[in-house]
Image: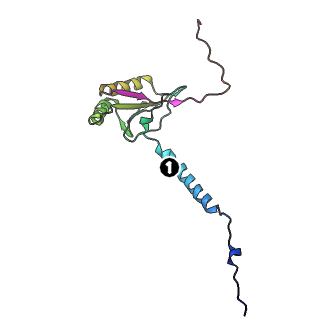
Amino acid sequence: MAIAKRNEGAKVNSDINVTPMVDVMLVLLIIFMVITPMLQKGISVDMPKVNNPTPMADADKEDALLVSIMRDGTVYFGTDKINVDSLTGKVKDRLANRTDKRVYVKADARAHFGNVVQVVDGVRAAGVDDLGLLTDQRKSTPNAPPAAPAPGQ
């Protein structure tokens, strides 16, 4: 009688199947694409563009005090719409038990200057030590002409 020998090693597939990994990566990509716009804190504002903005990483923190000024003059403290006259009181209430007395102002690039000054005055009247004006980085064009010299130079 002969012994039947099974050759199971020949049936083993040693190729890597990347299809499940690609499926997982696509799902993660879609999740991050949906979640990322929701991570912006406060109200969406078209901030002024500058060449060399000062980075203010603390403005993105969860407990940062953020005042937003819209183009039409509407003022938001965090996500709450408020009147400029009541801003000083609300900022004082929030700063009462904090050691870091810092407030960030995010104004629309086309907001009236007088509205921004009123908000800054209201925040300063609340006893704020540090006031940060948030801006965006200006996109530089590689072939932009040099700035014209001022008259008389």
* Residue for point 30% across, 33% down: 99
- Dividing the picture into quadrants, the one containing residue 65 is top left
From the image, which quarter does the N terminus lie in? bottom right
Which segment did they paint magenta? 128-139
Q: 145 left or right of 71? A: right
Q: Position of residue 63 (x, y in %)?
A: 36, 40
- Dividing the picture into quadrants, the one containing residue 104 is top left
* Residue for point 50% across, 49% down: 35
From the image, which quarter does the C terminus lie in? top right
In this orientation, which residue lies closer to the viewer: 123 or 14? 14
Q: Which residue is mark 1?
A: 35
Q: Position of residue 146 (x, y in %)?
A: 64, 18
- Dividing the picture into quadrants, the one containing residue 101 is top left
Judged from this view, the residue extending furthest toward the bottom is 1
Q: Position of residue 82 (x, y in %)?
A: 35, 35
Q: 46 left or right of 1? A: left
Q: Position of residue 120 (x, y in %)?
A: 37, 25
Look at the image and say whether residue 43 sits in the magenta stretch: no
Hey, what amino acid is under mark 1?
A: Ile
Judged from this view, the residue extending furthest toward the top is 152
